[in-house]
Amino acid sequence: MDSISELTNSIRDHLSVQPMNKFDSVKMPQKQPFVIGVAGGTASGKTTVCNMIISQLRDQRVVLVNQDSFYHSLSDEKLQNIHEYNFDHPDAFDTDFLLSCMEILKDGQAVSIPNYDFKTHKRTEQARLINPSDVFILEGILVLHDPRVRDLMNMKIFVDTDSDVRLARRIQRDTVERGRNIQDVLDQYARFVKPSFEEFILPSKKYADIIIPRGGDNDVAIDLIVQHILTKLGQHDLCKIYSNVFIIFSTFQIRGMHTLIRDVKTTTHDFVFYADRLIRLVVEHGLGHLPFTERQIITPTGSVYTGVVFCKRLCGISIIRSGESMENALRACCKGIKIGKILIHGEGNSGRQLIYQKLPADISSRHVLLLDPILASGNSAVKAISLLLSKGVPESNIIFLNLIAAPQGIHAVCKKFPKLKIVTSEIDASIDEHARVIPGMGEFGDRYFGTDKDNNNKALHHSWDFPCLGTPK
């Protein structure tokens, strides 16, 4: 490219909105990369930390993006007064261009990123082509300063190193690698680097998920970060975006049961049997997210066993009518649990009207297990959760249990209620124009309660060759 303006125009072309066709809503979602932000003061060891993370993620495609690449090229006038220019101020960076590039990368497309020459203080003619990857590490002193940049990140790291150590490293780097004299380095540090650190960089530390003291010398912190990244990479993309979304661990048994309840030919009898099994697993997984206290008991052998006791002030709330299918599993796990009900009626494509409610009088003091097997658009769930909040239930006390969730529903619920938890057994591709989950399992309530007019049990009945699943008698 001849100029940076052409490069910027290319970025804008990539970001232009393309018309959607009627089938776009049912396409498989684009796999999202895991974005890590690494901030910290000058010469704190950010690049060392990044390289250590990259070296341990050998089986993943990892790309390092430096915020330094997005410095503004200085005009001749500014170059004549280079000693008056603050390179540690947010205005020194072309943040809009950085955001454009990162959005393209997150969209699964390659992008050209400029090279910045620290001796001439200009971007070079040659750009660096970066391809889509599993992990992007965005490194720079101010990557946690701008909220727009922070919103791109799945993990935010701040490298915290002693100021004297950082100054010594900066002197060595700027004199050896960038050809500057010691006096100029010290003057720049006193006039710009230190004040900017205190005004812009250090305050961004509060946004970090992880703070690494001593930078690259902290092997334990690096190991923990890498293990966390590997865990997240093995999760569904939405679990990387929303830390309050949990999918039960998938096994061939669970996949087999999903195959059966999703099959249009499955009889009502078999559908209920396998749906009940899956519901029980989801309920038990959801109960595992309740608060607990440690407790020691004496076993029949006279030994001491250190265990836990879970919160007992619970109640279940089912969204009528599909949610009622989950009540038996909840009662089987929690003897004598109170269960309330909410009936919500749809109005058009998005509106929801509360028709009926029957909730425990002391619900505000309880942890609530909200029951609905299908999370589609999320409109009914948002209405039900809003009702619970209006009754004084803390958002963090709500656990939403379902069998299948659509991305649209998860986005709708998690963006509005980030403190509650969603526990599901699978996340499907999308919803269609009728707000039905795709591939889904059809109208759950009709299939479970046998009110599906299209379901002729006698005609569709057949035996399943899944002995390991325990075919119902």
Image (cartoon, rainbow, N blue to C red):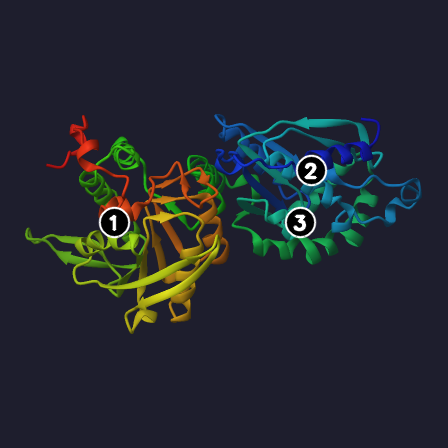
Name the residue type under label 2: Ser
Q: CA distance from mark 2 to mark 3?
A: 47 Å
- Taking depth in this image into account, of 89 and 359 the one nearest to the observer is 359
- Up-down: is 298 above or below 266? below
Between disc 2 and disc 3, whose residue precedes? 2
Residue 284 has which mark?
Answer: 1
Residue 270 position in % (x across, y down): 19, 38
Q: Which label belongs to residue 164?
A: 3
For mark 3, give the secondary structure. Answer: helix
- Residue shown at 70% from the left, 53% from the top: 197
Q: Nearer the viewer, mark 3 or mark 1?
A: 1
Residue depicted at x 25% and y 49%: 284
Residue 260 relative to residue 234: left or right: left
Of labels 2 and 1, the one closer to you: 2
Residue at the outermost bottom position: 361
Question: Where does label 2 land, which residue?
Answer: 16
The reply to whether the C-beta atoms of the residues labelled 3 and 1 are less than 8 Å apart is no
Name which residue type carries label 1: Glu
